Amino acid sequence: MREIITLQCNDCKNRNYTTTKNRKKHSERLETNKFCNTCRKHTGHKEVK
């Protein structure tokens, strides 16, 4: 079953993106580079609760 997760910017701690993932297949936290509108640059984004 796919669950909705939220991605948070590592620099400004702003929660910018939502996506889905299958927790049975990928139990570790997702981390990816995305564009942050607050920072106005590409930064790392981590999964939060």
Image (spheres, rainbow, N blue to C red):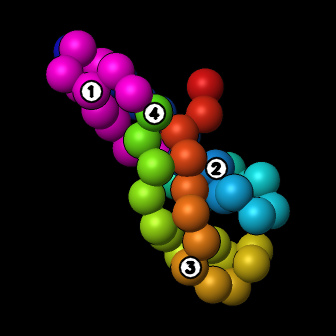
Identify the mark nearer the N-term, 2 or 3: 2
Residue for badge 4: 29
Give, as a three-letter code, the residue at label 2.
Gln
Give the residue displayed 19% in from the left and 22% down from the top.
25
Q: Which label belongs to residue 10?
A: none
Proximity of marks 2 and 1: CB atoms separated by less than 8 Å: no
Left or right position of 23 against 19: left
Q: Which label belongs to residue 8?
A: 2
Q: Give the distance between the C-alpha atoms of the residues marked 4 and 2, in whole angstroms.
A: 12 Å
Identify the mark nearer the N-term, 4 or 2: 2
Crowding near the residue tagged with mark 2, few <14, some 14–19, many ≥20 C-alpha atoms within 10 Å: many
Which percent across, then down, holds residue 33?
Answer: 47, 67
Where does the C terminus fall, quadrant-wise?
top right
Proximity of marks 4 and 1: CB atoms separated by less than 8 Å: no
Q: Which label belongs to residue 42?
A: 3
Q: Give the distance between the C-alpha atoms of the residues marked 2 and 3, in whole angstroms.
A: 12 Å
Seen in the picture, residue 25 relative to 43 is either above or below; the reply is above
Quick one: which residue is furthest to the right in this view?
12
Identify the mark nearer the N-term, 4 or 3: 4
Report helix, strand or loop for mark 3. Answer: strand
Residue for badge 1: 26
Which percent across, then down, holds residue 32?
Answer: 43, 58
Q: Give the distance between the C-alpha atoms of the residues marked 4 and 3, in whole angstroms.
A: 19 Å
Identify the mark nearer the N-term, 1 or 3: 1
Which percent across, then down, holds residue 34?
Answer: 49, 69
Give, as a three-letter code, the residue at label 1.
His
State which region is magenta. Answer: 18-28
